[in-house]
Image (spheres, grey):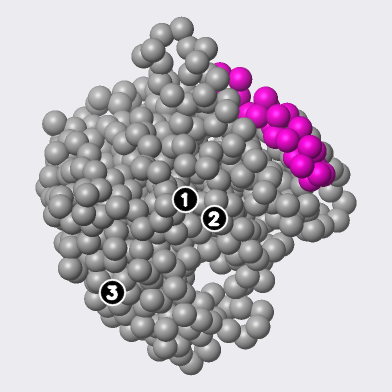
Amino acid sequence: MLAAMPTATNPPPRDEPPIPVRLDACPGTLRLHSADDGALARVRVPGGVLTAAQAGALADAALRLGDGSLHLTSRGNVQLRGLDGDCGAALAGLLDAAGLLPSYRHERVRNIVASPLSGLDGAGHADVREWLRGLDGLLCASDATAALSGRFLFALDDGRGDVAALGADVTLLALGDGAALLHIGAAEGASDGAAGAALRVRAADGPRAALTAAEVFLEAAAESRSNAAAESRSRAWRVRDLPDGADALARETALRLDAAGIPCTYAASIPCRYTDTATATDTERTSLPTGAAPPAPGIVDGPDGLRALSVLAPLGTLTAAQWRLLTDVARTDGAGELRLTPWRGVVVAGLCQESADARLRELAAAGLITDPASPWHGVGACIGRPGCAKSLADVRADAATALGAGGGLPVYWSGCARRCGHPQGDWVDVVATPEGYEVDGYRVTERGDRLRTVVTDTADMNESSDVSGVSESADVPASAGVPGPADGRTSADLAVAVAAARTSAAAPATT
């Protein structure tokens, strides 16, 4: 059930038409989603960048209207939970006053992820914040883009390859020669689609080119619906949903850019991994980097002598006290802003060395993840019970009791087979079932110490072993009992079972 904000008590403050009816159910701040723990609002934070004042407004909203916590998403946005279903007017007014609702018509489509360390650590080829400001402004000024799905995603990558691997529909990648790669469709290696197509444009034209690609997508999606043989056909929410794929979109985008006087070069499909060296050819430069590591928790050194603090929120949730501490660090010792990451972390920049050391200790004492060796590092979970009616377990409580050593592949706990919010790439898949849990498809009916051992061993072995060659007909089926001392099986047996599950199960799409 979706609870719409009551328009009679909170009309849009600008001369804007009503919010159009959407076919996708992604929540926003003007369209609340009803959950078992109350209404839910998803606040879009383009690029994850918040001023200290905006962060303070979100804390006020969580305390006054919600459950007092701030929940980070896999797109660097913020969710408020436990809301009263009738609080829409008060919530919109509070967020609008903080500058978090520049356009009521576009509040659900401002889905932009950006390299969170861009301009801070000397890596990458450009500071993408100018792109971020430009693209967000163009999105909010375009009548057409108000019709984008709440699932459509833009990524702005400074060249290091971190957000380019997140499977965005439109990706801008900074190149080392002052140009940019406009990639349409999921990047190579991303789990939610095949490789797309790319155009090479001037860096200064990047935001306009990205907007043009989105507008071309909307036209193609409308044509796809009109040509559908049956009315039951789902609308194309993302590039991967289009029958003609990304190549057709890239060709049409190139024509539109040329007509607008924006030079570009069509780079066709992307067959290889990204290379950007002094000897790289133009063909090598057309593919995207994938799999760059997200910011590790700790202190990030900058070339200007300043430092940034990178912390992670345990299971993606911050208490209002933790959030306000981060805001205070940004306002008092830093550059006055927070950067939320797609890996449920927060970066605070602009600290001197002495302040950085002291503040990191303070954040650690407050319960935030500040050390890569933390057992919480890499552990994620959906909301689970009691917040979600579809969940089959209190996955957060079970994740806490099954913590192992830090490191290894990410481990994600899902309360049901939908796997809401799961990470991209490879991860240890822990899913609740009516009988217990499945760890990468391997059935586990016990919890506590036994479950902790299985999850930790699975993470460690997937990190250190090449399991890609194991066939679907492995000796230990996914439905077998839990290997361990009780039944005489070894860790090697578990590795075979996990490999079989990985090669036989298709990764679900993230919404």
Residue to which mark 1 is pinned: 110
In the displayed structure image, the side of residue 164 where residue 182 appears, left or right: right
Residue 166 percent across, percent down from the top left:
52, 45
Identified by mark 2, the residue type is Asp
Residue to which mark 3 is pinned: 322
For this rendering, which residue is in front, 505 or 54?
54
Cα distance, mark 3 to mark 2?
28 Å
Residue to which mark 2 is pinned: 136
Residue 12 percent across, percent down from the top left:
34, 53
- Image quadrant in which the C terminus is located: top left
- Crowding at dot 2, Cα within 10 Å, few <14 / some 14-19 / many 20+, comes out as many
In the displayed structure image, the side of residue 266 where residue 33 appears, left or right: left
Q: Is residue 175 visible?
A: no
State the extent of the magenta-drawn residues as a range. 242-264
What kind of element bears circle 3?
helix
Identified by mark 3, the residue type is Gln
Looking at the image, is mark 1 or mark 3 earlier in the sequence? 1
What kind of element bears circle 1?
loop
Q: From this viewpoint, which residue is outermost toward the bottom?
A: 354
Q: Is residue 310 magenta?
A: no
